[in-house]
Image (cartoon, rainbow, N blue to C red):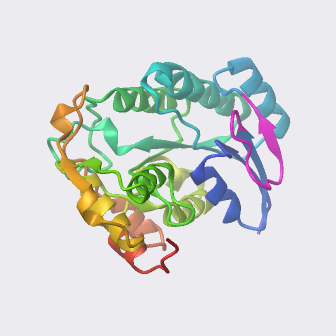
Amino acid sequence: MTARTVLITGGGGQLGRELVRQAPSHVRLHVTWRRTPPPASPTAHQLDLADEEATLRLVERVRPDVILHTASGFREETLARDVVAATRSVAAAARVCGAHLVHLSTDLVFDGEHAPYGEEDTPAPIHPYGHAKAEAERLVRALCPGAAVVRTSLITRVSPPDRNSAWVLEKLRAGQPVALFADELRCPIAVEDLAAQLWELVALPPERQRGVWHLVGPEAISRFALGLLLAHRHGLDVSLVRPSSSRAFPHPRPRDVRLRTDRADRLLRTRTRPISVVLGNVMRDA
C-alpha cells in the first residue's frame, strides 16, 4: 500500500490520541498540539492554529496528503479564535498545499426541532458552539470544496474516561449530586469507533470522501441517561444522578439532534456500538 503523510490537528485531545493509536502502519504521521502535548507521538509540532502564517509554514514543511482537523475549543469566549480562526488557517493551508481536508464538526449545528437530521440537511444552529462550528463548516466548503465534513456527537471514552465522564465520576465518588440534562437527545459514540471510521474514510479515494458525513453512535440518549449508565458501571450511587432541564441553561440548546448515518452505513465497514453496550460490556475498574 502506498505510504501517505497524514497531519492530525489536536494530537493531545482524546480523539487525536486515539487516531494516533489506530494509525495504519503505512501512514507517515504528524500531529499538532498547543497546550496538551500528545503522548508518544511519531512527530509532534507545537502550533497555534489560529496563527495563519505559522500554520501555513508547518503544512508547507510537512506536505501532508491528508489533514485530519480534530482540534477545537469549547469555551464560549474563545470560540471565534479556537474554532473559526483555527479552521480558517487549516483550510487555507490545505488549499495552498493541495492537501485533502477532513474536518470534524458537531451535531450542534442543528436547531434540534427536525430530527433525525440527514447529511443533506442545512445547519441551523441555536447554540454558540453550534454557531461557531457552522461557520467553520462554511469556511471549509468555501476554501476546500473537496473536503470531508464529519459531524459527530458526544465522544465517549471508557478508560481513562473522557472529560465529561470524568467530571461526573469525580462528583459521584465524592458523594455529591450531579444534575444532567434529561430533555436533550444526542447519539454518543465511543472514541475507538469514531477513530476507526475516520481511518476508513481517509482510505477512500478523495472523490468519495468529499461532502458531509455523520459519524455517531446508533443509540440516542440524554446526558441524564448517560450519567446513570456511568454510575451503574462504576458501582456508584445512581440516586445522586439527578435530571435537569436544558431550558434553564443561559443559552438555548437543541433538544433533539439525532443524526442519520446514511453514508457510513453504505460505505464503511466499522459499525458503531450503542453507548449502553460500550459502557455495559466492560470490566468495572471503580
Q: Position of residue 266 (x, y in %)?
A: 39, 68
Residue shown at the point (35%, 26%) measured from the top left: 128
Q: Is residue 221 visible?
A: no
Residue shown at the point (41%, 63%) measured from the top left: 264
Answer with left or right where residue 206 lies relative to residue 265.
right
Q: Position of residue 135 (x, y in %)?
A: 42, 26
Question: Which one is nearer the viewer's eye here, 213 or 230?
Answer: 230
The quadrant where residue 54 appears: top right
Quadrant including the N terminus: bottom right
Q: How many marks?
A: 0
Answer with left or right where residue 32 lies relative to residue 131.
right
Residue shown at the point (47%, 24%) measured from the top left: 79
Question: Which one is nearer the viewer's eye here, 76 or 269?
Answer: 76
Q: Is residue 43 visible?
A: yes
Q: Position of residue 44 (x, y in %)?
A: 80, 44
85 relative to 199, above or below: above
158 relative to 89, above or below: below
Answer with left or right where residue 69 lies relative to residue 165.
right
The quadrant where residue 246 appears: top left
Instruction: Give the magenta-colored segment's residue range.
Output: 33-47
Answer with left or right where residue 61 lies relative to residue 78.
right
Residue shown at the point (35%, 32%) measured from the top left: 130
Question: Which one is nearer the viewer's eye here, 108 or 162?
Answer: 162
Magenta segment, prevailing SS (helix, strand or loop): loop
Q: In the image, is residue 191 part of the stretch drawn in magenta?
A: no
